[in-house]
Amino acid sequence: RVWLPEHLHEMTAEALNGREWRVQSVALEPLRYVPERRFTALCRVQLAGAHAEQKEICLVAKQVGDPHKAKRLYRNLLSLEYALAQLDHVPFRVPRALGWIEARAVVFIEYLPGNNLKQTLLELEIERMMPRVGELLAVFHSADKRVRKMLFKTDQLWSRIAEGVGMRE
């Protein structure tokens, strides 16, 4: 809770629009805990602006077993962000790495609002969804497997997959 307010401006510069904000409070909401392995929490940071504006910034803090795992997670997220930025069109979002504390093995990750994937999977109507999943896999597996360079441009591949399962953007 001490480190976060001191480094918040570095991690969330675009969300703060270059303005000065004062941290009023930091609240942690546990999301997942695996004893001796990892702890994940939603950090809600309440901010106050110079003209009595109020703002809330949310980010995820993930503490893992040791600093080497934290560093690997942080670097993997940066690599994924870089790789996805090279593509023309990606139909999903991946949270960005915002920062990390080596001594505490904590990685701060962008919070993406939406449904929890694990909970959503529990609520799916399996009988209705499985045929569409099968269609998606069939399209995926029907793609040419032996190519010298690149199968498709990425945006064409996403379009082909979407057409195969009857989805439109």
Image: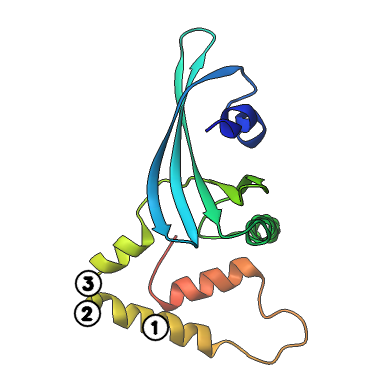
Q: Which mark is residue 58?
A: none
Quadrant hosting residue 163: bottom left
Residue, x 61% and y 25% (percent of image)? Answer: 17
Of tags 1 and 3, the one toward the viewer is: 3
Q: Which mark is residue 135?
A: 1
Amino acid identity at mark 1: Glu
* Place of residue 161 in the rendered image (x, y in percent of width and height, measured from the top left): 49, 75
Residue beneath disc 2:
127
Residue beneath disc 3:
125
Q: Is residue 107 left or right of residue 167?
A: right
Residue, x 68% and y 55% (percent of image)? Answer: 78
- Label 1's element? helix
Of all residues, the one furthest to the front in this rendering is 36
Of tags 2 and 1, the one toward the viewer is: 2
* Place of residue 7 in the rendered image (x, y in percent of width and height, measured from the top left): 64, 31
Amino acid identity at mark 2: Glu
Quadrant hosting residue 29: top left
Answer few, some or many: residues within 10 Å of disc 2's Cα (few below 14, many 20 plus, some between 14 and 19): few
Disc 2 or 1, which lies upstream in sequence? 2
In front of the other: 132 or 95: 95
Q: Is residue 3 left or right of residue 93?
A: right
In front of the other: 34 or 158: 34
- Label 3's element? loop
In front of the other: 120 or 142: 120
Answer few, some or many: residues within 10 Å of disc 1's Cα (few below 14, many 20 plus, some between 14 and 19): some
Disc 1 or 3, which lies upstream in sequence? 3
Q: Is the Cβ of the residue at disc 3 closer than 8 Å to that at disc 2?
A: yes
- Rounded to the nearest whole Å, what is the CA distance between mark 3 and mark 2? 6 Å
- Rounded to the nearest whole Å, what is the CA distance between mark 2 and mark 1? 14 Å
Residue, x 43% and y 43% (percent of image)? Answer: 42
Q: Is residue 156 left or right of residue 130?
A: right
- Rounded to the nearest whole Å, what is the CA distance between mark 1 and mark 3? 16 Å
